[in-house]
Image (spheres, rainbow, N blue to C red):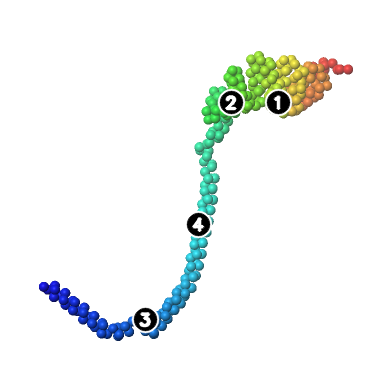
Amino acid sequence: MLIWILFILAILSAAAAGLIVFQHWSEIRMLNPLSIKEENERIKREAIVAQRFSRLQTDKIAPFKYLYKKGIFQTKKSFHEAYLRLIRLDRVYQQAKRPFAKVAPSEQERIKVLLDEARSMARDLKWADAEKRYLEVLLLNNRNADAYKGIGALYLKQKMYPQAKETFEYLVKTKEADDASFAALAEIASAEGEVGKAEEMRVKAVEMRPRLACRHAELARYYVDLCDYAKAWPSAKRASDLEPKSAKYSELAMECAIVLGDRQEAKRRYDKLRLLSDDYQKLQQFRERIDKIKVLV
């Protein structure tokens, strides 16, 4: 019952308020600021002032915008310079690391070290140790020609002819043979009594290194051992001409000239040998043999 009374009072209050508004509407309408001319002008003035203030603020902010943009540019530039410095530092670091490469040598460096050790051991007649080093090289690179040449030379010095022959013939097949390889095959052929093959290999050794005096001298001695001084002479002469300060090559050439009966050439070689050798007994023997050569009329 109380609720209904309150509800009726609310309706009556709303109706009274509406009646009051209706009766004074003309006065209330005049209270609208937009309907007053002065108020409209005030609003326009405020708008103009606001616009001017905005422009002023923009003008004030402009230097800061410029500085901001400049700051962004400088930041990017600094970043780029820092990046370039980082690259340069990385290069310096990479260069600094190189000396430490010796701590963990590459395969090629390891092979070089093993080859040097093997050659040194071979010179000291440590055949087994030298062979071991060469075999280690071949484990790293089974096509290394220097290792095959070295191990072949070891077998040859130990007169292990079958093993040496197999090694050097492999080099010939793989086209890795040099003048020393052909000289070794010539020595093996001579040891096995293959005269024709020995001569062929000596000639090939000379053809491989035509300006190497020792190869011509080896060919000359090969013919001297066969008592074929006519064939030995050109090679002996060539060896002596390539190394005119070699006493042994001069002796070889003079020996051929004496046997062939060429007194003039023998005497010329003798005069050179006198300046190279202090073996007076051998020089006297050569002189006596030269004097016995009949002068050709």
**Label 2 sits on residue:** 148
Earlier residue among tags 3 and 2: 3
Q: Amino acid at mark 2?
A: Tyr
Q: Residues within 10 Å of mark 2 (few under 14, many from 20)?
A: many
Task: Identify the residue under disc 3.
Answer: 34
At label 3, the amino acid type is Leu
- The quadrant of the rendering that contains the N terminus is bottom left
Q: Residue at x 69, y 27 (%)?
A: 209
The residue that disc 4 covers is 79
Residue at position x 66%, y 26% from top? 179
Nearer the camera: disc 3 or disc 4: 3
The residue that appears at 52% across and 43% down in the rendered structure is 97
142 or 45: nearer the eye?
45
Q: CA distance from mark 3 to mark 4?
A: 58 Å
Q: Is residue 124 visible?
A: no
Q: Quadrant of residue 35?
A: bottom left
Q: Which residue is mark 1?
A: 207
Query: How far apart are the two marked residues, 2 and 1, measured between alpha carbons?
Result: 21 Å
Location of residue 46 in the rendering, given as x and y in whole percent from the top left corner: 41, 79
**Where residue 274 sits in the image (x, y, percent)?**
77, 24
Q: Amino acid at mark 4?
A: Phe
**Considering the numbered disc 4 on the image, is that residue within a helix, a strand or a loop?**
helix
Q: Left or right: where does residue 42 sit relative to residue 208?
A: left
Residue 264 in sight in this render: yes
